[in-house]
Image: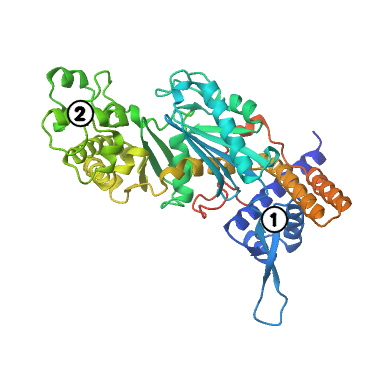
Amino acid sequence: MSDAVHATLDLAAIRAQHTLLLLGLLWQGERARVDIARELGLSRSAISSMVSELMAVGLVQEVGTRGSGTAGRRATLLALNERAAYLLAIDLGKSHARVDLLDLRCRTLATRHVAHDIQSGPAATCALLASLSAAVMGDAGITRAAVALAGVGVPGPVDQSTGQMIQPPNMHGWDGENVRARLEGTLGVGVQVDNDANLGALAEARFGAHRGAVDLIYVKVATGIGAGVLLGGRLHRGVRGGAGEIGHISINERQNTAQSTGQPEDGQVNQLPESRGDLESYAAAQVVVMLAATLRTGGMPTSLPDPATLGDLLAHANTDPLARAVWEDCGHHLGVAVSTALNLFNPEAVVIGGRLSQAGEVFLDAVQRSALSRTMRINAERTRIELSTLGSEAGVLGAGAMLLDHLFTPQGLRHLYAISAYTSAQAAVRLSAQAGNPQAAVVAGTSALYTAHASPPLPALSAASRAPPDALADPRADSRGPPNLPPPV
C-alpha cells in the first residue's frame, strides 16, 4: 500500500475519532461550536467541518442560541438528535420476555412485556421476540430501517466471538444455539448478545446510583445467579465470555457430608439435594421456596399461605418471621460468595439486582454482614454493597448501553450515519409533503441520503465489530454519555 493511501487512511481514522469525541460532548449536553473547539483542542474550522457533516446526515441539530449578556455575537447551540436512530433492547429471562424501543439516549419510546417460559426453546422464543419487536416499532410509528441495532441480554453464558450459548444451566435446549445469528435472521437488523448480568453492570455504571463507577460488580439474583464484573471501566468477560458466573462458586465443598448428617454448616438449612455445593444451590429462587417449606415443617411461625410462593416471601420479607428467616439465610450465603469477589477484585461497589433483591433491607443486611465479616479490611472499607435502584429497567438499559458501545466506535459510525441519513430523509419527505410540495420532498430525501454516502471515509461496520470493542475512553466521564469513546489522537 502506498504512503499516500496510508496517509489518507490515517487522516480518516483521526477524523472519525474526533467526530466521536464531538458526539460524546453533545451527548452530555448542548454546546456551541466554540465550546467544542475549546474542549477538544481543535480549530474552529475543523469543528465546523465535522458539525456540517453531522448535521447533513441528521445526527446533530441546531437548537437555539446562547446570549453573552453583551453586544457580542450570540452563539448557536448544537444538540445530539436523539431520534436520529433507534435501538431495540431485549431483556430475556427464564419466565419473561421484554422488548423496548429506545432512542439514542436509551429512553424508552415503546415497550412490550409478556410472561414466557424460556424452556420453550430458541425457535419459539425468537419468534416471540420478533413479534414483540414489530409491536413496539408499530406502537412508536418507526420502521425497521430506522433501527440501528438490537441488543439482547440472556440468562446464560455467551461466547462473545460467535454469539453462541455455551451450556446455559437454566436454559435447557439452548446449548450451542447461536442467538445472534438466529435473531439477525428473524429481526432483519444487526444483533448484539450478552449475558444479562454483564448488561446489568453496564446499566448500573452508566444509568444507576453508581454512574461513573469504574470498578463495580453487579450480582443478579433470580432463578440463576450471575455477576457482571466491571474493572477499570471495562467489562471483564474472560477468554470466551464466561467470566462472572458467581452462582457456580462452591461455598460448601463438604456438601455431601452435610446432607448425610442433616447438619448444615453455620446453622444454615441444607441446599438442594442434587447440588454440588455451589451458591445457586443455596440462594437461587427455587431454593428459597423449598427453604420456606422446610422451615415451616420445622415449626417456624408464619402467617403466609401454605405453600408460600416466591411472591409471598418477597411481599412479607420484613414482616413475617418465616420470610425474614428465609431471606437472612439466602443473604448469608450470597454474602459468602460476594466476599470472594471482594477479595479478588476490590471493587468500589457491589450492586445486588434481580427479582430476589426485592426482599429489601433484611436481605441486604444479611449479605453485608456475611460478606464484610469475611473480607480483608483493605478490600472492605471503601466498598459499598447496595441494592440496585434500576429495578426491572436494568436489562433494557444495559442492552442500550451495549449498543451504544458498538455504534460510537469508528466501526459503527458509518452505520450510524446511514441510519441517521435515512431517518432524516424520511422526516424531510414528511415535512415537504405536509407543506404540499412533493417535488421538494423528493429533493430533500435524495439530498440527505446522498450526503450519507458521500461523507468522508470511515471504517466499515464489519463482522469483527460485533465483538466487544475496546474501552478507550476515560471511564470516569459522565455515565450518560456514549460509553467507550476514544481519547484525542
Q: Residue at x 19, y 26 (%)?
A: 270
Is 334 positioned to the left or the right of 17 in the image? left
Say if residue 34 shows up in the picture: yes
Query: Of the residues shown, which amino acid type is indicated by label 1?
Result: Val
Percent across and percent down for residue 79 are 65, 59
Q: Which residue is mark 1?
A: 60
Furthest-right residue in this view: 439
Label 1's element?
Answer: strand
Quadrant (top left/top right/bottom left/bottom right) for the N terminus:
top right
- Name the image colouring: rainbow
Q: Residue at x 43, y 36 (%)?
A: 197
Which marked residue is nearer to the observer: mark 2 or mark 1? 2
Query: Of the residues shown, which amino acid type is indicated by label 2?
Result: Ala
Percent across and percent down for residue 341 are 33, 37
Disc 2 or 1, which lies upstream in sequence?
A: 1
- Above or below, 77 relative to 279: below
Q: Residue at x 34, y 30 (%)?
A: 247
Is 384 positioned to the left or the right of 129 in the image? left
Tell me the quarter of the picture where residue 245 sits: top left
Label 2's element?
Answer: helix
Tell me the quarter of the picture where residue 269 sits: top left
Furthest-bottom residue in this view: 71
Percent across and percent down for residue 4 are 82, 41
Percent across and percent down for residue 104 are 61, 48
Furthest-front residue in this view: 305
Is 397 positioned to the left or the right of 60 in the image? left
Q: CA distance from mark 2 to mark 1?
A: 59 Å
Say if residue 231 shows up in the picture: no
Q: Residues within 10 Å of mark 1 (few under 14, many from 20)?
A: many
The label shown at residue 293 is 2
**Towards the viewer: 346 or 224:** 224
